[in-house]
Amino acid sequence: MRSDQLSRILSERRAVAASLSVLDRTPDIEAVVNVADEGADMTGVGDSTMALKRARDKAAAKTLGGTVYVPDGDLRVTEEIVWEPNVNLIGSGRWTSRIRGDFTGSTKGVIAFTGSSFDNALTLRGLEVRAKAGLGYAVILGDATNVFAHNELSDLRLTFGDTACAFLQNTVSNLFSHVLAQDSSGHGFLIQEATGATNNDNLFIRCRAVGSDTGGVLIEDAVHQIFVECTFEGNGDVSGATYGIKSLNSNGVKLYYCWIESYNSATDGQREGVIFDGVLDAQTPTNGVVEGCTFRRQGRYAIWLTGSAEQVVVRDNSLGSVPFSGSTNVKIDSGCENNWFLVNTDNFDDPAGWDDAGTRTTIVFPSFRTYQRTPGARRVQPVITLVAGPPDRYDIDAFADSRIRAGTRLAVGEAQIFVNETTDPKTVKIRIYDNLERITTAHVFGIVRLVGTLSHSNAGNFDVEEKVFHFRHRIQGTSSIDVGTTAAYVSTATGQANESLALTVANWAQQGATQTGDATLHYVEFETTLNSGGRTSPIMGLYVRYELYHGN
């Protein structure tokens, strides 16, 4: 990722960025306490609980606090170690220095940063912290009355834990960098506030949540959790709904350039890549972002919006390969409104095939171009709104303008409606708004060009069919009347004489107008169907181009 992209992301959370200057602290050598010097058995056989506590207390007694150093080896503890707020904890590497909890307790962690406020106090680096069956967590950060804030956790491996590898329950503006959370019976990262506490403004850079049974990351009732170049893969088991990362009743969960992949099948493993479920409260929408991410082999949905999630922006992502058989790229449940998807042919492949239960989802195609010849008009990006069917309908807002002389082109636009479509036959509606404003009587003349494409496994391998239609749209006040359509010509190009791709158009709207203030929004609408004629393994695409001209 380019440095300017990272700078842009960091700038969204100035509080986090401002805290980074205090995080890169090189410990004073005089203030470092080696746990081995306090009697720790680094073979992992003996009980090193008291040695670690002595090292902690000796470092805490330093005038400005100190650092506990864990050398290479396996340090075994038999009770929860509650840490001190002015003591760093570092090892020689996450694969070589290990603190291992050899005890049980569903609410306990191997290391607990609780009981005191940890604010600008801590560096935790270069360690593996390992829980065991029957132990709740590897690490616990914060509690109901004590905040864990402005600290750095880097180059860590957090493993196992019945509930989570890492439990964040009262955390603010911390930096997590290169932290691996792996193989929990629950979650890799559980970001779930304690009563009366909060989780705000944490930044995760190049972290990984891998192989946990319930999900990689659960974020509940939290605000502004940002993930940059993180990985969520291989999470979930056969027990039920699982996911890579889930935002539950939270605000501002943002994913940039992340990798989300399942290792398993449609019924065994990470069934959803990213879930946005609900809003923080009635006044605070979801405000999620998924940008530049790569999705691979999701068991059910790559992205799922549910629980009235709203104001989620999805842009510039790559599916790369189709999900497992029977799954859907994107599912949007009823009640999830005002969400934006910037899509192209590499972004979830086929927006027309989304499971979009009656909601209005705004889609902007970066390949969709429009031009206006109005004096002083800007070149604008048109908006396409997907209205779920059946059949699905694409509302194209042409951004035309009536205040020009007769015979001048209002707008021209083009878009690829779908690609890689395997439903056969496939029917969609297309509605084109001409957006004439403050006008008494006028004519709009239009040209619509449709191109259908087909590839398949039979002889010939491909077919292309094109149809062009002319129409006249008479505008009068707040009504739209006299909508006429004529097939001016039909031209067909085929890969072989016996190819049979059928592109048909039907159900033209005879009138359409809605009055909004002083703007009368008129449209033409038609239904188009692609039918492969029974070809084997058909893959179809539909391209549309329109031109609008002002009449009298």
Image: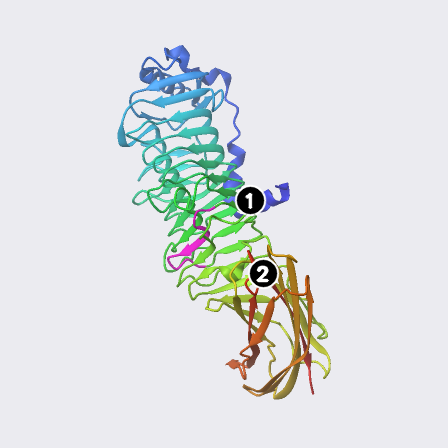
Q: Nearer the viewer, residue 97 or 121?
A: 97
Read off the residue under disc 2: 540
* Amino acid at the residue labelled 2: Met
Q: Residues within 10 Å of mark 1 (few under 14, many from 20)?
A: some
Q: Which mark is residue 180?
A: none
- Count of marks placed on residues: 2
Residue found 66% across the figure and 69% down from its top: 466
Q: Is residue 295 magenta?
A: no
Read off the residue under disc 1: 257
Q: Quadrant of the N terminus?
A: top right
Q: Nearer the viewer, residue 410 or 489?
A: 489
Task: Give coordinates of residue 417: x percent, y percent.
Answer: 58, 64
Residue 158 in the image: above or below residue 62: below
Q: Is residue 303 magenta?
A: yes
Residue 419 in sight here: no
Residue 308 in sight here: yes
Q: In terms of secondary structure, where does tag 1 sit?
A: loop
Q: In terms of secondary structure, where does tag 2 sit?
A: strand
* Amino acid at the residue labelled 1: Tyr
Residue 192 in the image: above or below residue 503: above
Left or right for 331, reference 403? left
The residues colored magenta run: 298-310
Residue 378 in the image: above or below residue 74: below
In the rendered structure, which disc, 2 or 1, sits on the residue that comes first in sequence? 1
